[in-house]
Image (spheres, rainbow, N blue to C red):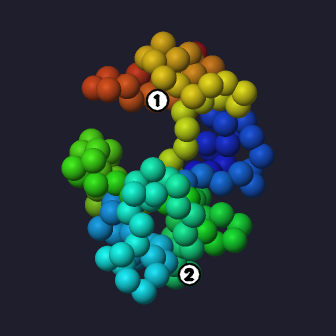
């Protein structure tokens, strides 16, 4: 997945890492949060400000978000904080057994981060991605053309 995102959207070097988004309740399984998982710094992880070791046993399970040193710039997601994103990760976890997804900024190389629907559509049409979810709408490129 990392190669696909780098090729179709980011147009960047394959060694550049992506961030993992994980349901907060599953973070202790995938990341080394230290001895006291109740005391680990939740706020930095909520905003992808914490780089933590990925549990050694899970590194091959989530290779797209595992940095070269075995770490990840963790984002934890709660139902209260972002219900829609939480449900997406939860459904992905139900389908795959892994409640972790790749997260990256939505922009093309050299472009600012998408902040409006017009920006999103422009980035979508100028990239190799084939589907865009924008709020309650799903936009797909014509596969025939």
Foreground residue among 74 and 122 = 74
* Residue at 64 percent of width and 72 percent of height: 70
Q: Is residue 79 visible?
A: yes
* Residue at 77 percent of width and 46 percent of height: 13
Circle count: 2
* Residue at 56 percent of width and 81 percent of height: 56
In the picture of the structure, the residue carrying the numbered disc 2 is 56
Q: Is residue 101 visible?
A: no
CB under 8 Å between callouts 2 and 1?
no
Q: Secondary structure at mark 2?
A: helix
In terms of image quadrants, where is residue 93? bottom left
Foreground residue among 140 and 20 = 20
Q: Residues within 10 Å of mark 1 (few under 14, many from 20)?
A: few
In the drawing, does residue 49 fall left or right of residue 22? Answer: right
Q: Quadrant of the C terminus?
A: top right
Residue 107: where, in percent of width, then height? 60, 30
Residue 54: where, in percent of width, then height? 54, 73
Residue 103: where, in percent of width, then height? 50, 48
Check residue 131 in the rendering and tell me which mark sits there, or answer none: 1
């Amino acid at each position: 997945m990392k190669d696909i995102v780098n090729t179709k959207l980011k147009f960047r070097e394959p060694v550049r890492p992506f961030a993992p988004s994980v349901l907060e309740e599953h973070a202790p399984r995938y990341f080394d949060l230290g001895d006291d998982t109740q005391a680990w710094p939740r706020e930095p992880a909520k905003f992808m400000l914490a780089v933590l070791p990925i549990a050694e046993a899970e590194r091959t399970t989530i290779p797209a978000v595992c940095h070269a040193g075995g770490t990840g710039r963790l984002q934890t997601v709660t139902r209260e904080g972002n219900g829609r994103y939480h449900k997406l990760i939860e459904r992905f976890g139900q389908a795959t057994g892994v409640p972790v997804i790749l997260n990256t900024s939505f922009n093309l190389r050299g472009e600012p981060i998408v902040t409006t629907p017009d920006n999103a559509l422009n980035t979508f049409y100028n990239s190799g991605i084939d589907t865009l979810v924008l709020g309650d709408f799903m936009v797909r490129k014509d596969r025939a053309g």
